[in-house]
Image: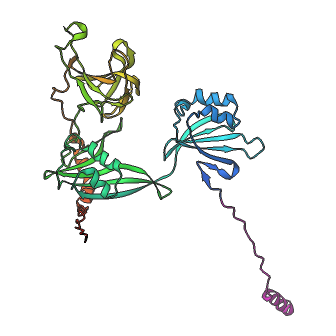
Amino acid sequence: MTLMVLVSCKQAKEPVDEVAIVETIEKPPVLHYGFNLEEFNVVHDTVRSGDSFGELMLRNKVDYPKIAAISENYRDTFDVRKIKIGNPYLILKSKDTSEAAKVFIYQDDRINYTVVDLRDSAVAYKSKRKVKLVEREVGGIIDNNLSVTMDNLGVDYSVTIGLSEIYAWTIDFFKLEKGDKFKVIFDERYINDSIYAGRGRIKAAYFEHKGRPIYAFPYVTDSVNNILDYYDQEANNLRSTFLRAPIKFGYRLSSRYNLNRRIAYYGYKVRPHKGTDYAAPIGTPIIATADGTVEESTRRGGNGKYVKIKHNSIYSTQYLHMKAQNVKRGDFVRQGDVIGWIGMTGNTGGPHVCYRFWKNGRQVDPLREELPSAEPIVDSLRIQYMEHIEPLRAQLDCIEFMEPAPEPEETLITYNQ
């Protein structure tokens, strides 16, 4: 027995050869737009003049029934009539001898794209590239104008536009003074951490005009319709209820509201003009002058194509002679939303929008009306709002103003003759 124990201990002490077990770890494929591009022959191109979705698909061996299915069944997702010249696209083709298109990816813009999957039954859907938001803070002192100051700070022009829209009812941006100051906190969008894709929302702003400080903070007061407005440090709404004109830029007031208008063509008979005409090039966007619900979006007689919006129990507005409407009956629109485009439909001698304004069921002159201010934050939300803006206001207060760059000194150069 003693001998057996010794033998067992000796065997236990003998070295055992270790066997290395090697696991093969397969790396997951790199996906682009949700596809492994290595599985396809990939064609990168852009939409050229004369291209259409149907022709592109036929050239890449897609059967007509699939083309028709996309064109007819997915118009709300991908309107094949509206692909734009210059927009990039990818065609993923099979690697077999047929090289038929299996997937068509259309880049709507830098972030959004549309996928047309033709592998089985033809389907289309929209998606977005992954975007990283980077918060940025900027403060400046105006030396020339806001646009130039922003450009010198390396800020996207859209931030200038954003500020002008936020403060449109409280500050005249055409009458800014040297020494006016501003601060702004906003997001910048980046694709793959390096490709700039535009600005995001302006999170908070401060503008000091003629020594008067005005803060601006975005806040949602209507969660049902997701209505977001900008309010000041005292919870007052920074916008007015109505815009003065239904066009943002490039318009001319061509004819005012006039109940005693006489026209030579009609023998100088009184023909009241109950609208306010704004002339602009065909295709100029027409915007809603206030929040409301679309009552009518149709075409009728001398009005041509038009949109009528009910804002509340007192006010309604109407926009005539459109080239096309961008809304339908029942849609809820926000102030500034594009509802159509300037045209010449109906009785009109040139491209313009006839803007009509109703108060208590009677057409009035909007340029003579004392329009109401937008409502401040209700008392029930006031405490919550003040708590919400406290850290944002502290962040704004810590941003330093960047002094304008000094102008280069002139150097007098003399030449010896």
Q: Quadrant of residue 373?
A: top left
Q: Nearer the viewer, residue 169 or 405?
A: 405
Q: Position of residue 250 (x, y in %)?
A: 30, 34
Q: Residue at x 21, y 22 (%)?
A: 256
Q: Is residue 121 visible?
A: no
59 over 15 or under it: above or below:
above
Q: What range is drawn magenta here?
A: 1-27
Q: Image quadrant for the N terminus?
A: bottom right
Q: Is residue 395 left or right of residue 187?
A: left
Q: Nearer the viewer, residue 122 or 45?
A: 45
Q: Is residue 11 left or right of residue 94?
A: right
Q: Is residue 199 left or right of residue 9?
A: left
Residue 12 belongs to the span the image colors magenta: yes
Q: Is residue 185 visible?
A: yes
Q: Position of residue 165 (x, y in %)?
A: 28, 42
382 over 5 or under it: above or below:
above
Counting every numbered tag in the picture gives 0
Q: Is residue 122 left or right of residue 239?
A: right
Q: In the orientation shown, which residue stands out farthest toward the left?
A: 211
What colour scheme was applied to this rendering of the protein?
A: rainbow
Q: Position of residue 146 (x, y in %)?
A: 25, 51
Q: Position of residue 199 (x, y in %)?
A: 38, 50
48 over 153 or under it: above or below:
above
Q: Nearer the viewer, residue 27 or 290?
A: 290
Q: Residue at x 51, y 32 (%)?
A: 82
Q: Image quadrant for the C terminus?
A: bottom left
Q: Quadrant of residue 357?
A: top left
Q: Residue at x 33, y 17 (%)?
A: 348
